[in-house]
């Protein structure tokens, strides 16, 4: 494994204290999502397994802030000093919240884990044991998804980047860099490594895309 060239400890003082209105909005949206997911079917994953906890775990900006708010000072310092920016084989970011000690719950933020982890798992990695995956209604998922990603039907939540780009969906590490205001550095990282599954929005042509390691853009087309 290698690390992306960025010093995460330098940005922690900038991003750890959120404005009160932002914190309140995040808590409100997460409460709505938790209500929606309250009766969802549960996975029966073995406690030692982390097979699907790989491949650049994507989340919304709201979920990123919720995770920040859930951690104390010691936990934040640990994550930002040693866990962020680690790249797996294949150019994906390793989830910074995986706990290596299998005697413990493998996810350090299980109670505030992103929607994708709660509903679908995060990758196509084969399970080590036969697991019966529950069916989750698409309508319910997209209701929760829109609650996290959109303020109104036509207004999504993101962070502005240079060149008329907006960060729409990303791993925790990428949100942290963008949230610190070091957006030029983030674009440089994307040029070297690709966007590591992060989804960007181009204001010039209203398109969503990811960036490959060769710098080419792969347009995303989806229906919410």
Image (tube, rainbow, N blue to C red):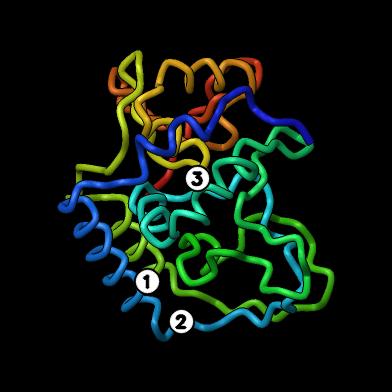
Toward which corner of the image does residue 80 lie, by quadrant? top right
The image position of residue 5, as x and y in percent, is: 62, 22
Q: Residues within 10 Å of mark 2 (few under 14, many from 20)?
A: some
Could you tell me if the residues under marks 2 and 1 are in contact, i.e. CB atoms within 8 Å? yes
**What's the residue at 57%, 48% (across, down)?**
79
At mark 1, the secondary structure is helix
Q: Is residue 11 left or right of residue 154?
A: right
Q: Using the image as rendered, state which of residue 123 and residue 99 is in the foreground.
A: 99
Could you tell me if the residues under marks 3 and 2 are in contact, i.e. CB atoms within 8 Å? no
Q: Which residue is mark 2?
A: 40
Q: Which residue is mark 1?
A: 140
Number of numbered discs: 3
Q: Is residue 190 left or right of residue 181?
A: right
Toward which corner of the image does residue 182 lie, by quadrant? top left
Vertical side of 147 occupied by 130: above or below? below
The first of marks 3 and 1 along the sequence is: 1
Q: Using the image as rendered, state which of residue 134 and residue 184 is in the foreground.
A: 184
Give the numbered dot on residue 172.
3
The image position of residue 107, as x and y in percent, is: 62, 65
The image position of residue 47, as x and y in percent, is: 72, 77
Q: Looking at the image, which residue sits at the far front?
A: 74
At mark 3, the secondary structure is helix
Q: Using the image as rendered, state which of residue 138 and residue 152 is in the foreground.
A: 152
The first of marks 3 and 2 along the sequence is: 2
């Amino acid at each position: 494994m290698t690390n992306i060239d960025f010093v995460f400890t330098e940005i922690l003082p900038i991003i750890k204290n959120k404005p009160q209105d932002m914190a309140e909005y995040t808590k409100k949206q997460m409460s709505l999502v938790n209500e929606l997911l309250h009766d969802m079917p549960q996975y029966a994953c073995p406690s030692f397994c982390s097979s699907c906890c790989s491949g650049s775990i994507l989340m919304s900006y709201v979920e990123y802030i919720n995770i920040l708010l859930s951690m104390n000072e010691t936990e934040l310092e640990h994550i930002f000093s040693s866990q962020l920016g680690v790249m797996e084989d294949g150019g994906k970011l390793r989830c910074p919240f995986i706990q290596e000690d299998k005697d413990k719950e493998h996810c350090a933020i299980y109670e505030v884990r992103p929607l994708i982890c709660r509903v679908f798992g995060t990758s196509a990695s084969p399970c080590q044991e036969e697991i019966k995956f529950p069916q989750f209604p698409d309508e319910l998922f997209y209701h929760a998804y829109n609650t996290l990603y959109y303020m109104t039907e036509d207004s999504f939540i993101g962070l502005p980047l240079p060149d008329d780009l907006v960060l729409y969906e990303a791993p925790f590490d990428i949100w942290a860099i963008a949230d610190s205001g070091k957006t030029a550095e983030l674009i440089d990282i994307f040029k070297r490594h690709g966007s590591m599954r992060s989804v960007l929005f181009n204001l010039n042509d209203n398109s969503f895309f990811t960036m490959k390691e060769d710098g080419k853009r792969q347009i995303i087309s989806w229906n919410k």
